[in-house]
Image: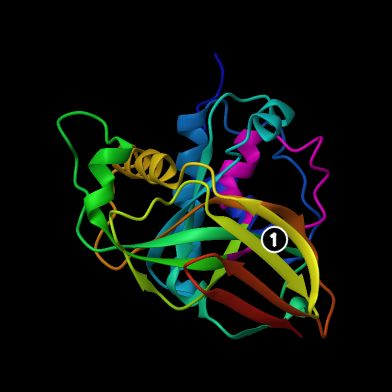
Amino acid sequence: MAESFDPDKAARYIFQAHAGRAEYRNLPPDIAPRNVAEAYAAQAGLARLLEPREGKIAGLKIATTTKIMQQLMGIDHPCGGLIFERRVFRSPAEIRLDDHMHLVFECELAVRIGRALPKPAKPYTAAGVKPAIAAVMPAFELIEDRNADYKDAKALSMIADNCWNAGVVLGAETPFDAAVPLAGVHGSLEIDGRASGEGRTDDPLGALAWVANLAIEQGRMLEPGMIVITGSIIPTFPVRPGNRVAFTLDGFGNAELVAK
């Protein structure tokens, strides 16, 4: 008979790997989750280890939203991760690269939740979560990929490793106007004043609905004040010490950081 999965053992392995600044590796077969439910159980175990240092859960993220990334990781769905309160930075922020093993960044549209999204009678839809949004803002996601080989990374191990989230930098909030569409919003990236990328939001409301439903599945819910980042607009990018980085989301201002 196969041994039962121990989520806390997997979580300790990941926690210790981060503490030792080890390069990313998929979890060893003898402790790896065998399905999505076990992967999120390991993520919850990791959260219990992190919370004394990083604070309570302040928000959620969605990852692997594109078909290309899903195919690369052998899945047909997005993945979700947790954002901890001491990893939420306000723009303009100074980010110390040496505090991480290998940090990269993404540009996203973030929302702040204004009213709770408890367990619904039916799964949330984009229309169902829209009234819960209080504010919108541009954001950087900090991603601790630990020099991962993206072509070899397995989705279940990445989920267990909190989808590599190392924090967010949030720009100033814009009160949400339900008449203003969030899909197709143009975003642009500058590094040291030079244009370095651009893109458009896909379906932030759909992403928020997916995250809200995932939270319910995991025994929690989105609560007032929580932040949700809704997916990368511009391909993941690295920075070097001294770089000044600005992400502008048309109609919603910008977020800025300096790499130290």
**Residue at disc 1, secondary structure:** strand
Q: Quadrant of residue 174?
A: bottom left
| 9 relative position to 206: left or right | right
One can see residue 234 in this view:
yes
Q: Which residues are magenta?
A: 140-164
Vertical placement of 63 versus 53: above or below? above
Q: Residue furthest left?
A: 121
Q: Please name the residue shown 63% across and 43% down the image.
A: 158
Vertical placement of 104 versus 173: above or below? above
In the image, residue 242 lies in the stretch drawn in magenta:
no
Place of residue 53 in the rendered image (x, y in percent of width and height, measured from the top left): 49, 75
In the image, residue 152 lies in the stretch drawn in magenta:
yes
The residue that disc 1 covers is 144
One can see residue 6 in this view:
no
Residue kind at label 1, given as amino acid type: Glu
| 98 relative position to 184: left or right | right
Q: Please name the residue shown 52% across and 73% down the image.
A: 87
Q: Quadrant of residue 225?
A: bottom left
- Between 101 and 196, the one nearer to me in the picture: 196
Q: Please name the residue shown 29% across and 61% down the image.
A: 177
Q: Please name the residue shown 47% across and 40% down the image.
A: 40
